[in-house]
Structure formats: C-alpha cells, structure tokens
Image (cartoon, rainbow, N blue to C red):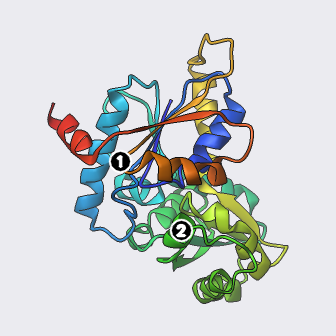
Amino acid sequence: MGVFDSGLGGLTCAAELMKLLPREHIIYFGDTARVPYGTRSRETILEYARQDIAFMKRHNVKMIIAACGTVSSAVLGMEAPAGDTPFSGVVEPAARAAAGLTKNGIIGITGTPATIGTAAYERALSSIAPDVRTVNAACGLFVPLVENGFTDRDDLIVKECVKRYLAPIKESGADTLILGCTHYPHLAQAISDYMGEGVRLVSSGAAAAVQAAEHLRAYDMFTDNTDKQPLECYTTDSEELFSANAGKFLGSGIDYTVRRAPVEEIIKGVSA
C-alpha cells in the first residue's frame, strides 16, 4: 500500500491503515520540502501529484492513497490518476461518511484554500446526498499550525484560529464537520471544543483508510504476510525532523523507518 501527502498529515491515514491492516507493507511519502500544497495553483498541485504517484509506483504498491485533501480535490473526476494502479483520494470517502452521519442535513467542510476553491467536497456530497446543505471554510493556517506543533486545545493561537475560521459553520447549525485535510485531526480537540459536543467530526484520512481496507477485501488483495509490518517512510526534507514529529501523528505502538528521497530524485523519476 502506498500513501502520500504534502507533509506529515497523511500519517493519520497511514496510522489507521496500520490498525486495520497490520500485516500489509505500507509505504508513506511526505513531501515535506514542498509543504504546504494548499496554497499552490492547481497546475502545480497536479504536477506534484504526478511526481508523488510516480514515486509510489516505483515501489510496486498494490494501491495508492492520496492522503491529502488538496491533491484529492485536484484530481477528483480524473480517470485513473495512477494508471492501472488502484487509486483513492480522501474526498469521496469522507463525503460518504459525513452523509451517513448527519441528522439535520447540514454539513460543514474545512480544507486548505486550494481544496475549498475546487468545491470538490460539495460535488461529492451532491452526488451522494443531493438534499444536504453545505457550509465551507478555507483554513489556510491550520496546516502550518500542525506542522509546527501548535495543536494544544488550550493554546490561544489555536483557539483564535479555530474560532475565526469556523464561526460561519457553527452559525449555520451544521451537525457534522468534515476535516478535509489529513492534518486537521490534530486540531480535533480544539475544533470540538468550539463546535460543541453535538457536532460529529469526520476525519478524511480515517475514512479513506476504511474504504481502502474494504477495497482490498472486495478484490481479495490482502497480503500473505503473517507478521506485523513496520511503516516505511520517505521524506523530501530532513529525516531527523520527520522522525522528531512523526510520533505525534502516528501515536504509540507503530514501528517505522525513515529515509530521505530528495526532491530532485522525485522530479527525475517522472521522466526516468
């Protein structure tokens, strides 16, 4: 299994996969040298995605998950983004999960400016549950906050950002909120405190992991491994920095290795 993201946020998806599929060999790629993707143009995002997918395919993975709301939104509707390798983003799985949870039919959507700009979640929800009403918020500072370790629910900066971004969603009466970027679950406590106990949060990474496990089961693609496998990670920036922060995203009990894959190698690999 291959999982990629612009940074460390996609490790939330990888962690869920490790819980669901402990015997699968999972490779994670975090493009930390070029994070965040969410403030880039669609053309740049698609080029980065093409390079990331090519890197994943060089490892002969059986399925690729774009554990990045920005990439998932950019490629939504494209036919076979990974060629003949099964591919999933996080948009459709999260939209499906949210549609199944809402009681009052009002769903809030959070994401990077690039993700919100595509209206990808709205389009996915429209096809799944046409009667649902949506309210969105482009949360441009959430990824930098998480990447820099500002996640504590009592941190004044975190609380103020959450309030400023999510006020329109709270005022709408939404009872379900999609965390449309895989970084955002690390702000879930602060988000939940602000939104209130009655609002259900949907982690896009966790939803994608569940759908991926269902795909492997449906197509009889489970591994023959009998032992639990460590997570194999690659980063385009410092291995030391990646390792120092990975534990915050993965939680305890997950073994992993980290190697550096320079940006030059990622770019070159597309045309190699």
Q: Callout 2, which amino acid?
A: Asn
Image marks 2 and 1: residues in contact by CB distance under 8 Å: no
Secondary structure type for disc 2: loop
Asked whether 90 or 243 is in front, the reply is: 243
Task: Place residue 54 in its image quadrant.
Answer: top left
Q: Dot 2, how many residues are within 10 Å of its Cα: few (below 14), some (14-19), or many (20+)?
A: few
Looking at the image, can residue 222 be seen? yes
Q: Dot 1, how many residues are within 10 Å of its Cα: few (below 14), some (14-19), or many (20+)?
A: many
Per the image, the residue denoted by label 1 is 236
Q: Is residue 27 above or below residue 94?
A: above
Q: Which mark is residue 148?
A: 2
Q: Is residue 50 above or below residue 129?
A: above
Report the residue at 68% width, 36% height from top: 254
The alpha-carbon separation of the residues under discs 2 and 1 comes to 17 Å
Report the residue at 70% width, 84% height from top: 170
Secondary structure type for disc 1: loop
Q: Callout 1, which amino acid?
A: Thr
Instruction: Locate the C terminus and report the quarter of the image it occupies.
Output: top left
* Residue 163 location (% of width, % of height): 65, 87
